[in-house]
Amino acid sequence: MSFADTLAATDWDDIRLRIYATTAKEVEAAINAPHLTLQHLPALLSPAAESYLPVLASRARQLTRCRFGHTMQFFVPLYLSNLCANECTYCGFSASNAIRRKTLSEEEVTAEVAAIKAMGFDSILLVTGEHERKVGMDYFCRVLPLIKPHFSYVAMEVQPLSQSDYQTLKTLGVDAVMVYQETYQRRRYAEYHTRGKKQDFDWRLQTPERLARAGMDKIGLGVLIGLNDWRVDSYFTALHLEFLQSRYWRSRYSLSVPRLRPYTGDKVSTLDMTNRQLLQLICVHRLLNAEVEISLSTREPAALRDKLMPFGITSLSAASSTQPGGYSATDEALEQFSTDDKRSPEAVADAVVQLGMTPVWKDWSQAFSG
């Protein structure tokens, strides 16, 4: 049984109805439950639960500190290529978008690594568009040996791959892979993905299972908030996480809560989420799952990130560039989307300290993997 079977057996409209029909009494029952389960999730994600945000936030903060201590992990994304063979109506890398394309050469990768190390980072997220022929396993096998020796923790966010490919990436030093479903509703997914291999909903959906079978240490999940009803999509994200944790417990898991940002060629109408609702979502994910890591990117403004940090967040990106070569050279015409928090790593670290937490630049070593 795969998660595709679980998804097929769970009706989107039924979950949506349960969320929006929730009463204050049902929210209170969920809050007061001795142990939260998925049965309580529609109530906690509901509009009715927004009135209880102070309670949710207080509990999420306490639970996060108990499990993760007063620490905040730091990482930085390195965009290796903006080539993409897909047509996605919400993405700046979309194949038909009239931007200049670039894939970093081995020399340029080395320059980017040097620039990133000079900023103090020891955890890196490698990002590409999805173009298997030009930016696929051959390319990854060439550049990973240039990158891994300089970082204790290497994650990737690239096109979905086969189980054997993930096993190869693991041998090359990859510690984590992030793969976001974008939306769990098949109909809306098809509307947003109109060309390329990303049209294959099930291939993407089953990627975390292939990753787990390949023995990947950490697997990242999430949706792109703004493409669909965030409350319903977030329910299915939690459902997916529970499915994976119950079957593939040797892997660790992380969640991301990215909101759609402006980009070159923007042509999608977003379904807005307020800042309070973003806090609600972060708190609910934390309360439902004490173990999962939750990251917050520079998509969000600095002041908001500072306010959200204590309530469930365990990792932050800083000084992010979403364009290939963005650290050793600057060319905004190549970026995937615009970032909002423009602070230096030192400034973000200072904000973390002001909140009573310790910035963690290195939080992983292969020596601990046996």
Image (cartoon, rainbow, N blue to C red):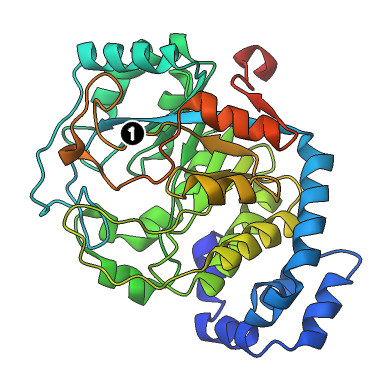
Question: What residue sits 68% from the left and 30% below the top?
Answer: 353
- Report x, y in % for residue 281: 62, 63
Quarter of the image where one finds residue 141 = top left
Kind of residue sitting beneath label 1: Ser
Please say if 47 is above or below 282.
below
Quarter of the image where one finds residue 128 = top left
On screen, residue 168 versus residue 197, left or right, reads: right
Quarter of the image where one finds residue 56 = bottom right
Question: What residue sits 16% from the left and 32% below the top?
Answer: 134
On screen, residue 309 versus residue 194, left or right, reads: right
Question: What residue sits 18% from the left and 32% below the top?
Answer: 331
SS label for mark 1: loop
Viewer can see residue 192: yes
Q: Which residue position is annotated with label 1?
A: 321
Please say if 360 is above or below 215.
above
Closer to the camera in the image, 227 or 144: 227
As drawn, the residue found furthest toward the right would be 34
- What is the quadrant of the C terminus in the image? top right
Dot 1, crowdedness within 10 Å: few (<14), some or many (≥20)?
many
On screen, residue 37 versus residue 161, left or right, reads: right
Question: What residue sits 16% from the left and 57% below the top?
Answer: 265
- Report x, y in % for residue 187: 34, 76
Viewer can see residue 164: no
Q: How many marks?
A: 1
- Report x, y in % for residue 87: 18, 57
Please say if 132 is above or below 5.
above
- What is the quadrant of the N terminus in the image? bottom right
- Report x, y in % for residue 44: 71, 72
